[in-house]
C-alpha cells in the first residue's frame, strides 16, 4: 500500500465529478427504497436520503459527508454504500454531499470561502444554515457517522464523541480498516493526543469553542454517540473510499452486535 507523497500544502490527488456521483446516488437510493428530503436552500440542490423501518422503537443512524470539497472519497463512499445496500434493520438518514460548491472547486471551503464545518454555532454559510434548519426537524439519532478525509494524515483515524461512555465502535472500525490502508499511529494527530492508535477522544468544552463543527452541534442537540472518520488522502482514491466504506460497515456491525441503548433511554445533553 503505497503513499503517493503528492499532497503538498493541501490535497493534490484525484477529483470526482460530484454531480455525476450525486445523480448515481439518487438512482441507487430510488432503487433501494430511500426517500429524498431536500435541504434548504434549494439552489444548492442538496438532499438527505431517508429510509425508515416503520418501527417506532427502531434505532436511528445518521451518516453525512461531502462537508469539505477537497475530500472526494466521502461522496464516493456514500454512493458505494447506497449501491451495496448492506444496512442493519434501523432507520437511516444519509446526506451524501453537504458542500457541493466546494466539491466542484476541489476546495475545503464553500464557494464563499467559509469552512462550513466550523460554522455550526452561529452559522453564516447557506450550507450550515440550511442543514441546521433541516436537522432541527429531525428526531434524535443513536449514532452519527461523519465521513471526512485528511490530506496530512499518515493513515486512517477517527474522532469519538461519546460522553455517556456507550459501547465504543472505534476499535472495530480501526481493526477493520487496518486490512485496507495504514492506520495513523502518531501519538498526536491534528494537534490532539490520541487515546489509542488511530482513535482520538477529544475533550471538548463546547461552550468555550466558537467555531463548532457538525459533530459538536450533533453532540449537543441530536446524538450521544458520533464518529468523525478520517481517510488519509495521500493514498489513491479507491483505497480511501474502501477505507471509509469498511469503517462504516464495521461500525454498523459492531453497533448491532452490542446491546446499544436506544435514544429514548439516554439523558439528553443539555443545550448550551
Ligand atoms: Zn473534512
Image (cartoon, rainbow, N blue to C red):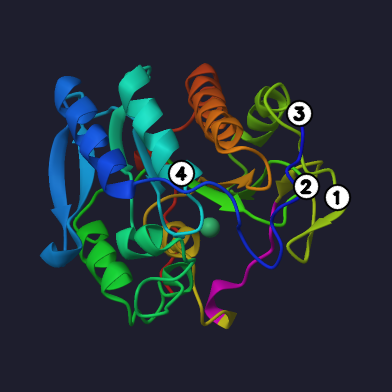
Residue at x-position 75% and y-position 42%: 198
Mark positioned earlier in the residue sequence (3 or 1) = 3
Residue picked out by circle 4? 74
- Above or below, comparing residue 211 to residue 203 in the picture: below
Residue 146 location in percent, x, y?
Answer: 47, 47
Of pointers 2 and 4, the one earlier in the residue sequence: 4
Between label 3 and label 1, give the one nearer the viewer: 3
Tags 2 and 3 touching, CB below 8 Å: no
Q: Nearer the viewer, mark 1 or mark 4?
A: 4
| Residue 61 within the magenta-colored segment of the rendering | no
Q: Nearer the viewer, residue 17 or 250?
A: 17
Name the residue tied to disc 3: 1
The answer to whether the residue bearing label 4 lies less than 8 angstroms from the nearest atom of ligand 1 is: yes
Q: State which mark lies toward you, 2 or 1.
A: 2
Tell me the CA gap for discs 3 and 1: 18 Å
Residue 122 placement: quadrant: bottom left
Q: Secondary structure at mark 1?
A: loop
Q: Earlier in the sequence, mark 1 or mark 4?
A: 4
Amino acid at each position: 500500500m503505497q503513499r503517493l507523497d503528492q499532497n503538498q500544502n493541501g490535497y493534490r490527488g484525484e477529483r470526482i465529478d460530484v454531480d455525476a456521483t450525486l445523480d448515481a446516488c439518487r438512482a441507487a437510493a430510488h432503487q433501494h427504497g430511500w426517500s429524498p428530503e431536500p435541504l434548504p436552500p434549494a439552489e444548492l440542490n442538496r438532499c438527505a436520503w431517508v429510509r425508515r423501518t416503520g418501527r417506532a422503537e427502531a434505532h436511528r443512524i445518521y451518516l453525512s459527508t461531502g462537508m469539505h470539497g477537497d475530500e472526494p472519497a466521502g461522496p464516493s463512499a456514500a454512493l458505494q454504500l447506497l449501491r451495496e445496500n448492506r444496512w442493519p434493520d434501523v432507520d437511516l438518514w444519509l446526506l451524501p454531499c453537504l458542500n457541493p460548491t466546494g466539491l466542484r472547486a476541489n476546495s475545503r471551503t464553500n464557494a464563499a470561502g467559509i469552512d462550513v464545518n466550523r460554522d455550526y454555532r452561529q452559522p453564516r454559510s447557506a450550507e450550515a444554515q440550511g442543514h441546521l434548519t433541516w436537522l432541527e426537524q429531525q428526531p434524535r439519532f443513536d449514532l452519527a457517522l461523519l465521513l471526512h478525509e485528511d490530506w496530512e494524515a499518515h493513515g486512517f483515524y477517527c474522532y469519538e464523541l461519546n460522553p455517556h461512555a456507550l459501547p465504543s465502535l472505534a476499535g472495530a472500525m480501526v481493526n477493520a480498516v487496518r486490512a485496507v490502508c495504514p492506520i495513523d499511529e502518531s501519538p498526536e494527530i491534528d494537534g490532539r493526543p490520541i487515546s489509542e492508535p488511530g482513535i482520538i477522544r477529544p475533550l471538548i468544552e463546547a461552550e468555550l469553542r466558537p467555531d463548532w463543527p457538525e459533530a459538536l452541534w450533533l453532540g449537543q442537540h441530536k446524538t450521544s454517540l458520533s464518529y468523525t472518520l478520517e481517510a488519509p488522502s495521500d493514498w489513491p482514491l479507491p483505497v480511501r473510499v474502501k477505507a471509509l466504506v469498511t469503517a462504516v460497515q464495521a461500525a454498523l456491525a459492531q453497533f448491532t452486535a452490542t446491546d446499544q441503548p436506544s435514544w429514548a433511554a439516554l439523558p439528553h445533553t443539555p443545550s448550551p
